[in-house]
Image: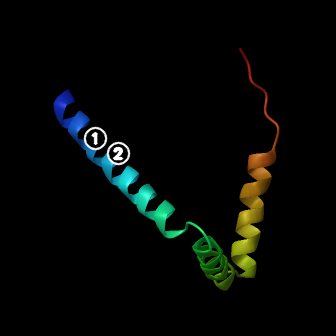
């Protein structure tokens, strides 16, 4: 693919992202944000299992490990 094709694809993805973000921000304005938050929290907590919790703890452990950065 040439540069023009990549730029068109990047523009389309950006436009869809901006439109999606704008719609979400309009939908969750005012008191609607409480309903939105509760829906997301209920969905996440509804899929909670012991195995998934342990997997997430593992990724948290990996992400919190200090590392050496050599210059």
For label 1, the residue is 11
Residue 67 is situated, as x and y percent measured from the top left of the image, at 79, 33
Disc 2 to disc 1, how far (Cα)?
5 Å
Residue 14 is situated, as x and y percent measured from the top left of the image, at 35, 45
Rendered residue at 69%/74% (across/down): 52
For label 2, the residue is 14
Query: Horizontally, is 58 left or right of 29 in the view?
Result: right
Model colouring: rainbow
Classify mark 1: residues with Cα within 10 Å, few (<14), some (14-19) or many (20+).
few
Residue 57 is situated, as x and y percent measured from the top left of the image, at 78, 63
Compared with residue 59, is residue 8 higher up or lower down, i.e. above or below? above
Rendered residue at 76%/60% (across/down): 58
Foreground of the two, 37 or 56: 37
The quadrant of the image that shows the C terminus is: top right
Rendered residue at 62%/74% (across/down): 31
Rendered residue at 73%/19% (across/down): 70
């Amino acid at each position: 693919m040439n540069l023009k094709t990549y730029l068109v694809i990047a523009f389309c993805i950006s436009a869809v992202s901006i439109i999606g973000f704008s719609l979400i921000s309009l939908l969750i304005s005012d008191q609607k944000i409480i309903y939105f938050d509760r829906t997301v929290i209920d969905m996440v907590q509804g899929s909670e299992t012991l195995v998934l919790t342990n997997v997430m703890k593992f990724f948290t452990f990996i992400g919190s490990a200090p590392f050496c950065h050599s210059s």
